[in-house]
Amino acid sequence: MSVDSKTVKKIASLARIAMTDAEVEAMVPEFNGILGWVEQLGEVDVTGVEPMTAVIPNSLRLREDVVTDGNIRDHVLANAPAAEHGFFGVPKVIE
Amino acid sequence: MTDLTDLGVADIRNGVRAGTFSAREVATAFNANVAEAKALNAFLIDTPEHALAAADAIDAKRAAGEELPIMAGVPIGMKDLFCTVGVEARAASEILNGFKPTYESTVSQKLWDAGCGMLGKLNMDQFAMGSSNETSAFGNVISPWRRNDGGNAPLAPGGSSGGSSAAISARLCPAATGTDTGGSIRQPAAFTGISGIKPTYGRCSRWGVIAFASSLDQAGPMARDVRDCAIMLEAMSGFDPKDSTSLDLPVPNWEAGLSSNLKGKRVGIPKEYRMDGMNAEIAAIWDKGAEWLRDAGAEIVEVSLPHTRYALPAYYIIAPAEASSNLARYDGVRYGQRNLPDGAGLQDMYAATRAAGFGPEVKRRIMIGTYVLSAGFYDAYYTQAQKVRALIARDFAQVWEHCDVLLAPTAPSAAFGLGENSDDPIAMYLNDVFAVPASLAGLPAMSVPGGLDSQGLPLGLQIIGKPLDEQGVLNAGLAIEERAGFTARPGKWW
């Protein structure tokens, strides 16, 4: 199947990446090239095959349901571009 | 006196333990090589003080008569994907500008505990996405190798661990960390005439390693020979409760287990790897590798991995899908760069930050990943790829009934020139055609130098092993290393 600029725009919006119309146009053939190439997977007979979820058999561990960390607010905020009053600062979202 | 920067991990450790030289002398010598090799652009950040402080700690321990750890006095390079406290970690991307981790990756902590110091943070493909180091936001790494045609064309050091490979082959460090998602340790090792091993998925903790594709990402050592890789892998491996996919198994003593006697071992040659139009010099070095392993006592058998040709397309669905999810965290809120156009709201800020911060290849992969995971396409692409991945893993499981390790080329060619493959994403992806199948199956795999091609450039041989059989991989690598007698090194022009 072939992807058009409308689809690329939609994907860019889902991925939260701003793109100019020129960038979108440039990506259309790249997208189609890559998707056309991976579509060969469709020819593999996968009847009865379960999708792989873990490469090495390894069951997820459970730990005690207790607090094991915390009290590191300054560490958490240390790299924030706009930390204010002990919180992450973002542009206003409610008018 | 020997140039200390010609020594590898084992020789440095042994010399420091014996008191032949001090750890400070070693760190000073490597710091000097790093400082004068700016032309290679292998290091993004130099941390000479870190290397010296670690060296002084080792020298003090020795003076106090304490036992020295397994990498005592060995200064290393750290791929920029690893978080180390207080030193900028950017995954070679603008989007992480200014990010100084407040925590230490498990692997780097283990290396400091083993006696290493850090010479600096190594350049790489942005978010480990690339095979030539050309996607770094901070410029290409230039391979120290040049073709013997006198043209001096700048060559790719491989990728994504291209800073690591260039730095080791240029004697800027005796060893370095790498990470391998679809060949990012093995292919750069092959391009620069060094060794590198990707262990079984789960051996090395992913905690504190900036994520690309979590079901594939594995850290591993890169160094100049097999013994050095064995030592460093031992230092890096081990169970970590902070990584949910970490294997809760003891770490074998791989260095002590090294043996190049392969009597009774069977080496499989996967016939599907002999592809149409294969480079004749790659085919020749592969045949030579098989001869060397036979000479070491192994029996050579032809085997079949029928789904090999589907590995690369499956990888280019699975890895971008995981990347699109992992890289959703770069939102300009919690760390790194923020772009806030005038009057922009929160959603616009996200989109502007990500547009400015990610490079073209990273955007391409996030977009592909978003697409294959989107409503209506998930089953056709992602589920299908995960089923094909199961078949690829099953091919390997069946092949272990016939052999102990597999021998294959590492890459389809020697190093190419910078810019030669960068116009066509798929041409670049094909570089990893021999590396990706083992990644999809989570298997240990290593590259060792086999020889030089007619252009005077290194060619690598790849050994793939059973799950958890790093020892078998290292031993076959050692058998090749002893017979290949690879001593070539790039002439110093930088």
Image (cartoon, coloured by chain):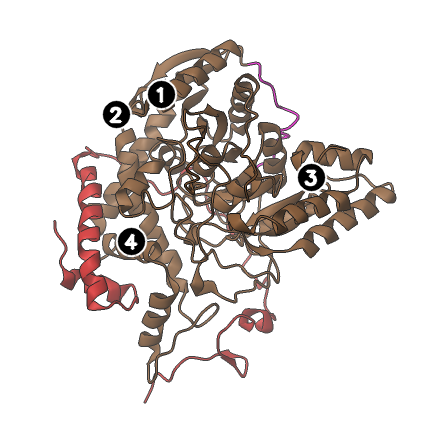
Q: Is residue B174 left or right of residue B145?
A: right
Q: Give the colour of chain B.
A: brown
Cβ atoms under marks 2 and 1 closer than 8 Å: no
Q: Mark 2 highlights which residue?
A: B277
Amino acid type at mark 1? Ala
Gap between marks 1 and 3 measured at Cα: 37 Å
Same chain for labels 1 and 3? Say yes or no. yes
Of the numbered discs 2 and 3, the one sitting upstream in the chain is 3
**Residue at screen point 41% across, 31% down:** B149
Q: Mark 4 highlights which residue?
A: B369
Amino acid type at mark 4? Gly
Cβ atoms under marks 1 and 3 closer than 8 Å: no
Q: Is residue B207 left or right of residue B2?
A: left
Q: Mark 1 highlights which residue?
A: B283
Same chain for labels 2 and 3? Say yes or no. yes
Of the numbered discs 4 and 3, the one sitting upstream in the chain is 3
Q: Secondary structure at mark 3?
A: loop
Q: Is residue B386 left or right of residue B53?
A: left
Amino acid type at mark 2? Gly
Chain that appears red: A
Which mark lies nearer to you, 1 or 4? 1
- Which region of the structure is painted magenta? B247-261
Q: Mark 3 highlights which residue?
A: B71
Gap between marks 4 and 2 measured at Cα: 31 Å
Of the numbered discs 1 and 3, the one sitting upstream in the chain is 3
Position of residue B166 measured from the top left corner of the image (x, y, whole percent): 52, 42
Same chain for labels 1 and 4? Say yes or no. yes
Same chain for labels 4 and 3? Say yes or no. yes
Label 1 neighbourhood size at 10 Å, few (<14), some (14-19), many (20+)? some
Quadrant where the N terminus of chain B is found in the figure: top right
Position of residue B124 measured from the top left corner of the image (x, y, whole percent): 47, 50
Q: Secondary structure at mark 4?
A: helix
